[in-house]
Image: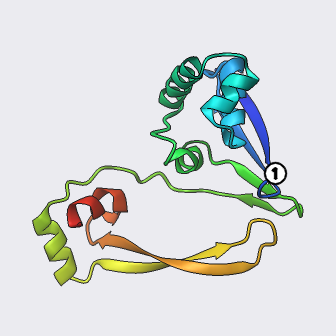
Amino acid sequence: MASHDLSVFLEEFGATVNLTLPGIVSEKERLLLKLLMEGMSVTEISQYRNRSAKTISHQKKQLYEKLGIQSDITFWRDIFFQYHPQVISGKGNKNNFYIPDNRCHHIVTPEAISLALENHEFKPWIQPVFCAQTGVLTGCEVLVRWEHPQTGIIPPDQFIPLAE
């Protein structure tokens, strides 16, 4: 099956994102994805393509299903998990991101969370925050990760809602 290369310049960050899409994506869908990656809203795309917002929204939903994108909120995470894009900053620095796809689902119960707390399985992870334009460290955020002794890292979306 043929594939399609997509290159998108993100003006806000001064960076180019290059990725290869599967051949199941049509040229129209490739353009839609490019516009979404550039940050255009459904309304803006509908005006640009002279189509109703409802039509564009439907096409976007079908494209997300085809590409394995869960929602607008997980858009970039899903792009990185599925297609491992290359990001090139305006300064010419290349970053190849590899995110292992360990997104298997674990059965999480309140009892398992209590046991994990007792066993000190929740670990803080420090996430640096950099300015995308200058590359300067601007801060950090602390994330919680569950390091399960048998199954490894359990994604936060599988335990935080239950823990709250």
Residue 69 point in image, percent of width and height: 50, 38
Residue 19 in view of the camera = yes
The crowding category of the residue bearing disc 1, from other C-alpha atoms within 10 Å (few below 14, some 14 to 19, many at least 20), is few
Residue shown at 21% from the left, 61% from the top: 162
Most extreme residue toward the left, as rendered? 111
Identify the residue at image location x=71%, y=24%: 47
With respect to residue 116, does 68 lie above or below?
above
How many numbered discs sit on the rendered protein? 1
User: Residue placed at 42% from the left, 54% from the top?
Assistant: 102
Q: Is residue 73 above or below residue 120?
A: above
| Residue designated by label 1 | 11
* Residue 19 shown left or right of residue 118 in the figure: right
Residue 159: where, in percent of width, then height?
27, 62
Quadrant including the N terminus: top right
The quarter holding residue 59 reads: top right
The foreground one among 94 and 44 is: 44
The three-letter amino acid code for the residue at tag 1 is: Glu
Residue 155 appears anywhere in the view: no
Q: Position of residue 147 (x, y in %)?
A: 33, 72
Secondary element type, mark 1: loop
Residue 41 placement: quadrant: top right
x, y percentage for residue 155?
A: 36, 60
Image-quadrant location for residue 6: top right
